[in-house]
Amino acid sequence: MRKIPEVAAPIDSAPRPAANENYLLINAFAPAARPPFLAVAKRVADAGCNIAETRVTALGTEIGVLVLAQGSWDAIAKLETALARLERDEELRLTHFRTGPKPAQTNLLPYMVEVVAADKPGILLQLAEFFQEHGISVEQLQSMRYRAMQTGADMFSAQITIGIPANTHIAALRDDFLEFCDVQNLDAIMDPVKF
């Protein structure tokens, strides 16, 4: 009886992403007179990709766009080439790089924090340090400085979406946060995000 030699199966070092599980993170800035979102969105569509997430904001005299494009490997490669031409032709300030999907975080409770205070240097840094020390992730953040209408005083405002680990004692965290705000002279609220 003749023995047939066994052939070893090829070793795949890393699983390949699914056909449309390739991601490109794009950051573009342009003067407010020529907002970059339409130009970027057109290149994404022309390359055969989808926009998975996007953020648009006015900062100073600029409009900033943050886009997460999703598509096949070749569509993302085509988009990368189109973005290089777009940056040159439209005079945008643009950066992009490949990334992956956001990992599912089922153990985080979404909460919204709103803060208003008289403006002073370091408020946002102190808030970020508080959350980091308590193991809380900052998922989204928007802050601004403005003048109070009645007094003309410089004011600070922030809206922050945070992810609180499910095993955190919420009442104790809320007490710690409100005490922190009292010491810093901040008016703040912390409420669960309502979907």
Image: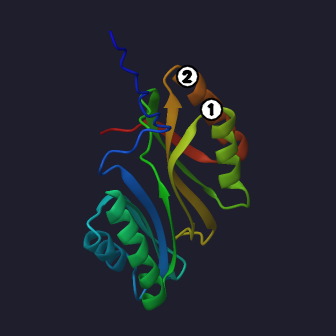
> Which x, y percent locates residue 99?
48, 53
Badge 2 density bin: few <14, some 14–19, many ≥20, Cα 10 Å: some
Q: CA distance from mark 2 to mark 1?
A: 9 Å
Q: Nearer the viewer, residue 41 or 188?
A: 41
Q: Residue furthest front?
A: 1
Of labels 2 and 1, earlier in sequence is 1
Tag count: 2
Q: Answer whether residue 185 is visible to the viewer in this image.
A: no
At x 52%, y 24%, the residue is 170
Label pair 2/1, CB-CB below 8 angstroms: yes
Q: Is residue 44 visible?
A: yes
In the image, is 71 to the left or to the right of 126? left
Amino acid tagged 2: Thr
- Neighbor class of circle 1 (other Cα within 10 Å; few <14, some 14-19, many 20+) is few
Please, which residue is most extreme toward the top here?
1
Foreground pick, 179 / 17: 17
Give the colouring mode of the picture.
rainbow
Say which amino acid is labelled 1.
Answer: Gly
Q: Nearer the viewer, residue 28 or 154?
A: 28
Query: Is 47 placed above or below 174 here?
Result: below
Does 158 sit left or right of 100 as displayed? right
Describe the element under mark 1 as helix, strand or loop.
Answer: loop
Q: Position of residue 102 (x, y in %)?
A: 44, 44
**Residue marked by disc 1:** 135
Q: Residue at x 29, y 50 (%)?
A: 19
Q: Which residue is mark 2?
A: 168
